Amino acid sequence: MAPPSDLREWIALLEREGELVRVSAEVDPDLEITEIVDRTVKAGGPALLFENPKARHPLLINQFGTERRMCMAFGVERLDDVAERLTDVLEMQPPEGLAEKLRGLKKLKSIADSRPRSVRSGACQEVVLTGDDVDLGLLPIQRCWPGDPAPFITLPAVITRDPRNGNRNVGMYRMQKIDRRSTFMHWQIHKDGRADYLFTDDRLDVAVALGLDPITAYSASAPLPKHIDELMLAGFLRGEPVELVRAKTVHLEVPANAEIVLEGYVRRGELGDEGPFGDHTGFYTAPEPFPVFHVTAITMRRDAIYPSIVVGKPPQEDAWLGKATERIFLPAIKMTVPEIVDYDLPVAGVFHNCVIVSIKKAFPGHARKVIHAVWGLGMLSLTKSVVVVDAHVNVHDYEEVFFYVGANVDPKRDLVVSEGPLDHLDHAPTLQFVGGKLGIDATAKGPAEGTRPWPEEIRMTAAIRELVDRRWQEYGIGGGSGHAANGRRGALRQLLRR
Ligand SMILES: [Mn+2]
């Protein structure tokens, strides 16, 4: 199944699959939508299309709020299937024989086709508002939480170019509305958009695309290295290039299929106090100076749909954007640190507080090598605590991880306390941006690490397990396969009575 090519196709797909509810009641983007969405997300509920928010245009929210919808967005059964396609390309070897050469060519073509393509016109420019006609009040921009001083655009794809080499960057940075024609641009200290801004002498053109096909929208949030264009990742994941048209008032190209585009610029040194904002950390981030974004044009489809997302105390809709990143980036992480088997970023850890890593341990001190490697890897370098477990441990099963953290760790011997850069939004460190880090080596220790012989873990023999699997029906305990039923206490009690 081909992934949706724009927001309209995506909405139609969600509707066909029973994953979207239209709300025709008049609803206020000021706080009311947040409370509705918060309850819907926590109940695993559908995407919501508010057809009559108190503004000219409708609002789509919770499009990414479940694992199923995230998979639908990518056109896959499991998020790991997306990673597999990337692994295929990353692990390409010189081909042998004709069949392999042809397969290799197909892979190369999929990379070549991922570069964005310029087109002459796009639906995103059916309506063009400039000068006094520019009015952000047309859009149902949400004020998300009671402590927010103004409405915030929360699901934008912010497009800039590096003034030194023209390389494009696309990032997702919240934008606090200042008035009809300006917002703040909250690119944090570690973000590529901010780097482009810092290399600017005077004025930096910025375009903001709103309402994209789900893969392109996701790609804006992906933590790619600075020199890689997020639209290329989008093209690769979609299997067809992102189409771009020239913006009307700035020197940038914008996604032709967008619902809405805000064109404008920021000026070097023109800052204002942005925030506070009820953030994905679960706390309000304090006001800080950020650049002012002046809107020179709003272009859009005639009946444009405005996309939004609410972040806050986890879990929120962004949990699944984060989980997509966790899965999609696993092959790239394994390329750099091949001993890594799997990793998990717990949603409750808001993606920078904690990472759990499983490794194929091969030598004394190996877990420490991986702890330090994580603290040196792209955006993972901001991780506050790293837990390392052995290859056989399921990193996504927090009970199992907790078991090994308790059982295998001598706190005096197995903790690595260090310091380094921390996430912009982390309020716990004494200084903003830098502070303490904790590594926990929860692997089994070998003779060169442990002071005493390490005991053997309890495991049933494979033969007995197979026997019981085979005979499970005979026991009359009921309830599916042996393994599934094994966990049930009642069933175990019955078994013991026999
Ligand atoms: Mn980037």
Image: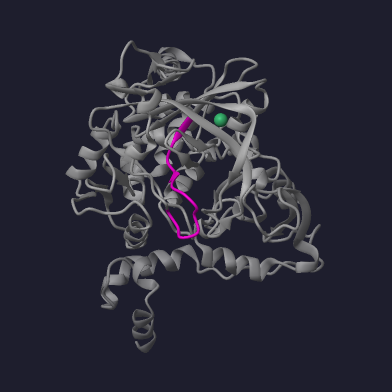
Q: Is residue 366 magenta?
A: no
Tell which quarter ligand 1 is in. Answer: top right
Q: Position of residue 442 (x, y in %)?
A: 67, 61
Instruction: Please name the residue shown 36% across and 62% down the image.
Output: 42
Instruction: Please name the residue shown 64% across and 38% down the image.
Output: 190
Number of callouts: 0
Q: Position of residue 489 (x, y in %)?
A: 39, 80
- Residue 207 versus residue 421 in the image, above or below: above
What range is drawn magenta here? 144-158
Q: Is residue 153 magenta?
A: yes
- Residue 23 versus residue 229 in the image, above or below: below
- Residue 333 versus residue 422 in the image, above or below: above
18 displayed left or right of 215: left
10 displayed left or right of 296: left
Q: Closest to the observer: 341 or 465?
A: 341
Magenta stretch secondary structure, dominant: loop
Residue 364 seen anywhere in this rendered image of the structure: no
175 displayed left or right of 352: left
Look at the image and tell me in which quarter the N terminus lies.
top left
Q: Closest to the observer: 474 or 53?
A: 53
Q: Position of residue 3 (x, y in %)?
A: 30, 32
321 displayed left or right of 49: right
The quarter of the picture where residue 374 lies is top right
The quarter of the picture where residue 410 lies is bottom right
Instruction: Please name the residue shown 31% across and 66% down the image.
Output: 481
**How is the rendered protein coloured?**
one colour
Q: Closest to the observer: 199 or 111?
A: 199
Q: Position of residue 259 (x, y in %)?
A: 31, 30
